[in-house]
Image: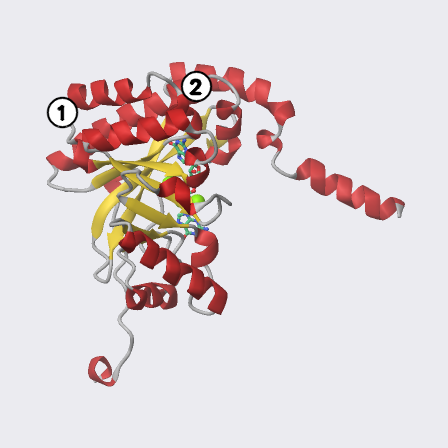
Amino acid sequence: YQGKRGAEDIVVFAGGAAGHPHQWLKVQAELRHALERDELVLWYQPKVGLPGAGINGVEALVRWQHPERGLLPPCEFLPAAEHSGLIAPLTEWVLRRALIDQAGWTATGQDWTLSVNVSARNLDAPGFVGYVTALLAETGARPDRLMLEVTETALAGDADNAVRAVKELGALGVGISVDDFGTGYTSLSHLRGLPISEIKIDRAFVADVDADPQSQAIVRSVIELAHGLGSRVTAEGVETVEIHRWLVDAGCDEAQGYLYGRPVPWPQVAVEPIAEPITERTAR
Ligand code: C2E
Ligand code: MG
Ligand code: MG
Ligand code: MG
């Protein structure tokens, strides 16, 4: 039993150290410097249209080029940022950097929409909509080429401020996307009356949708729900051609995943051509 208990302890302590509250103070102090020293970087993952799989847009995904620890994924520092005041300056940095990058790809002739993830705390903060409005004016970006991704849970409960912010952003013409849909344990009634332009089906349901009947039922009903609400629907985490084909058949509008392209700095954004199924016609 000693051995078993020991093994469990190791699992507990080895898991997600940087996401653990004990590490937050250190991460917070370092992150403050990182923002001052411009150590954050944005990588972009393509969002492709179905069935053709051409690039419709890109999603900005933040990384931290840490001076000692190398390139850190968001799970290593976002929890600490969320639990301190730092998520506000972090999101402001991300939005500004991403809109500047968008001006860069627009200048090279790419008409990609830009998706940016925002946290519940951002939507709750009183100055957020004003910040976005000012930034759009300053950068000259078109509001309808910007999409803000919010999670379902950010809109649930007594999220009065977040709901108001989403309505104001929608009125500006900014797209609102509900990210990781299906994982939030929230009631669908929260979506009613909101200007939702896109629903993103969580990777958990997409990963086995070509094989699992329950995932298939869930994904089909989310597609129908999205279309019924007048929204587009995007599947995240598409890794295989079989899943891609299933989604095309099910009428999904857009997809994202390693099959098409991983997150990279924007000048490297490109999509892999999708192999066509071998039929008698193409085999000849
Ligand atoms: P998300 O918005 O749902 O982004 C999708 C995540 O799944 C990204 O991880 C992406 O790299 C990963 N992914 C994409 N395609 C595939 C695939 O085919 N297979 C697998 N296994 N994974 C795939 P990443 O970049 O580590 O971001 C994780 C989360 O961190 C994001 O989830 C988002 O919630 C948050 N995040 C990222 N950047 C920002 C940001 O700038 N601000 C805020 N507030 N949150 C961010
Ligand atoms: Mg997202
Ligand atoms: Mg997502
Ligand atoms: Mg996700």
The picture places residue 241, in percent across and down from the top left corner, at: 35, 66
Judged from the image, the secondary structure of the residue bearing numbered disc 1 is loop
**Ligand 1 lies under 8 Å from the Cβ of mark 2:** no
Looking at the image, residue 224 lies above or below residue 281: above
Q: Is residue 170 visible?
A: yes
Give the Cα distance between marks 2 and 1.
Answer: 27 Å
**Ligand 1 lies under 8 Å from the Cβ of mark 1:** no
Number of numbered callouts drawn = 2
Mark nearest the camera among 2 and 1 is 1
Q: Residues within 10 Å of mark 1 (few under 14, many from 20)?
A: few
* First reached walking from the N terminus: tag 2 or tag 1: 2
In this rendering, would 196 be left or right of 68?
left
Q: Which mark is residue 34?
A: 2
- Asked whether disc 2 touches disc 1, contact meaning CB atoms under 8 Å apart, the reply is no
Looking at the image, residue 13 lies above or below residue 51: above
Q: Which residue is at a point 29% across and 59% down the rendered structure image?
A: 252
| Residue type indicated by callout 1 | Gly
Depth order, front residue of 132/74: 132
The residue that mark 1 highlights is 140
